[in-house]
Amino acid sequence: AQKVTQAQTEISVVEKEDVTLDCVYETRDTTYYLFWYKQPPSGELVFLIRRNSFDEQNEISGRYSWNFQKSTSSFNFTITASQVVDSAVYFCALSEATASKLTFGTGTRLQVTL
Amino acid sequence: DADVTQTPRNRITKTGKRIMLECSQTKGHDRMYWYRQDPGLGLQLIYYSFDVKDINKGEISDGYSVSRQAQAKFSLSLESAIPNQTALYFCATSDSGQGADTDTQYFGPGTRLTVL
């Protein structure tokens, strides 16, 4: 069975600090997808990134970057120079290619203050 | 207009009432899902459908039923609502094709359901 662990329940930082959200996953499949979603206070779930298990290249999108390491089964998310608008709950999720169903972690609540 | 819409957005009902939550999408995706979110538990899959004639139970299907009326519509019913079904409910869609977007789930805005 697949499992996603986000050990950090809540993180508080001051604006402009860098912050890394951890995600560790378990799966028996060799082909799978990893995702990050953002849930701002308004409640909707916003898709941020999808990573294929065969693609271990790190990705950068503006202030966001993702580090995928199969050796440690981790898919960590870093926000550089955090802003108040980054305050949200962030979910990591895993989908096995054979099942096409998402398994979510329990989320990390990020609070960015001035 | 939003690609995935959910109605109602908020609903308060009483124990024992039947309630239906509706989901519509204009993304042209073939797969649709219903999730429930409880504080501190992430999202849990209730039911999913890979096409109009395909319905599958998720992790927590007891007390729920679904109907896939068309490719674009997927409704969730609570036959007899109980207080511990108070939660935030999300509908999601994904595409089973071969594109770069395959299997990425896109979520509706959510329905906040309160059962008194």
Image: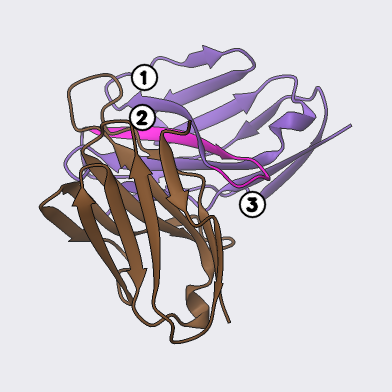
Chain colours: A purple, B brown
Q: Is residue B53 visible?
A: yes
Give residue B91's position: percent from left, percent from top: 39, 50
Outermost residue to the left:
B53
Q: What is the CA distance from the residue labelled 1 to the residue labelled 3?
A: 26 Å
Give residue B83's position: percent from left, percent from top: 52, 81
B10 lies left or right of A54: right
B59 lies left or right of B21: left
- Determine the chain carrying the residue at label 2: A
Kind of residue indicated by mark 3: Thr
Residues at marks 2 and 3, common chain?
A: yes
Question: What residue did someone put label 3 on?
Answer: A9
Instruction: Mark 2: give few (<14), some (14-19) or many (20+) Cα within 10 Å.
Output: some
Q: Earlier in the sequence, mark 1 or mark 2?
A: 1
Q: What is the CA distance from the residue labelled 2 to the residue labelled 3?
A: 23 Å
Query: Which is nearer the eye, B79 or A52?
Result: B79
Question: What residue did someone put label 2 on?
Answer: A70
Give residue B37's position: percent from left, percent from top: 50, 59
- Write the residue at 29% across / 36% down: B94
Question: What residue did someone put label 1 on?
Answer: A56
Residues at badges 1 and 2 in contact (C-beta under 8 Å)?
yes
Q: Picture quarter containing residue B60? A: bottom left
Q: Is residue A3 above or below residue B46?
A: above
Query: Which is nearer the eye, B46 or B22?
Result: B22
Q: Is residue A92 above or below residue A77?
A: below
Give residue B70's position: percent from left, percent from top: 20, 47
Check residue B79 in the rendering and tell me which mark sits there, or answer none.
none
Magenta segment includes A39: yes
> What residue range appears in magenta?
A31-44
